[in-house]
Amino acid sequence: IGEVTEGFGFKDTYVSCKWYLEWGKSWSFLAGEESSQTQYSASDDGVQVWNHPIDVHFATASMQGWPRMVATVWELDEYGRSILSGYGFAHLPTNPGYHELDVHCWRPSGSIREELQSFFLGTSSCLVDENMIFGKAWETRSQLVTVSSGVVKMNMNVLLRFFSEH
C-alpha cells in the first residue's frame, strides 16, 4: 500500500510516470493493479506532484523473486508529444512498516546525431527491450551509455502476514 508521490530533476514542465510490478515464479498476484500511470503534472519549480495510489497484494512461499517496481517517466513537450525521460526500478522493501523510496532514473544516450535529432525534433533514444531495465541488466546494460534524468519518489507501507512461519 502506498503512492507514487512526486518526481524531480526532469527537464520538462509536464511529466508523467508509468509503472509496473515484476515478481518471481514463487509469487502469486492476488489483488490490486500491477501497472498504472500517473497524470501529467505541471510544475514551475521542477517538482512534479502525482500522489498516485498503489495497492497490491501478493502471496508467496519463498523470498526468491521479491517484487520490484519498474518506472518509465514520460515528458510532454510544447507540441504535446510524449518523449521518454527515463527508466528506473526499485525493489519493494522487505521489512514491514513505512518506507520512502527514491527511484533514480536514466535514459539511453544516443550518438551525437541522435542527440541533435532529440534536441531539434523532440525525439529520444528508447530501449528496444525493456527487460534491459532489470532482467538483462547484468548482461547487456553495462554496454549502454546512459544519462541521469531525475528521481521518482514513492512512499510504501509494507504489511507482512505469516512470514514468521517461513
Image (tube, rainbow, N blue to C red):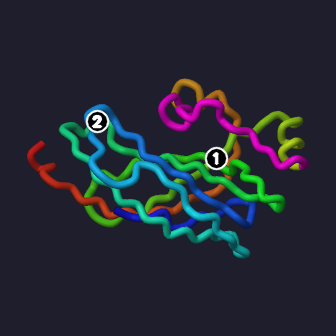
Q: Which residues are magenta?
A: 120-136
Residue at position x 51%, y 62% from top?
153
Q: Quadrant of residue 143?
A: top right
- Disc 2, SS: loop
The answer to if 125 sits in the magenta stretch is: yes
- Residue nearest the observer in this picture, 53 or 101: 53
Mark nearer the N terminus (1 vs 2): 2
- At label 2, counting other C-alpha atoms closer than 10 Å, the crowd grade (few under 14, some 14-19, many 20 or more) is few
Residue 7 appears at what percent x and percent y?
A: 59, 63
Q: Which mark is residue 64?
A: 2
**Type of the residue with mark 2:** Gln
Q: Which mark is residue 50?
A: none
Residue at position x 47%, y 47% from top?
20
Residue at position x 36%, y 39% from top?
23
Residue with the mark numbered 1? 106
Q: CA distance from mark 1 to mark 2?
A: 26 Å
Furthest-top residue in this view: 139
For the N terminus, which image quadrant?
bottom left
Residue at position x 67%, y 44% from top?
107
**Type of the residue with mark 1:** Trp
- Residue nearest the observer in this picture, 112 or 114: 114
- Image position of 59 (left or right of 35): left
- At label 1, counting other C-alpha atoms closer than 10 Å, the crowd grade (few under 14, some 14-19, many 20 or more) is many
- Image position of 94 (left or right of 103): left
The answer to if 130 sits in the magenta stretch is: yes
Furthest-bottom residue in this view: 44
Residue 151 appears at what percent x and percent y?
A: 59, 58
Residue 30 appears at what percent x and percent y?
A: 27, 48
For the C terminus, which image quadrant?
top left
Residue 129 appears at what percent x and percent y?
A: 59, 30
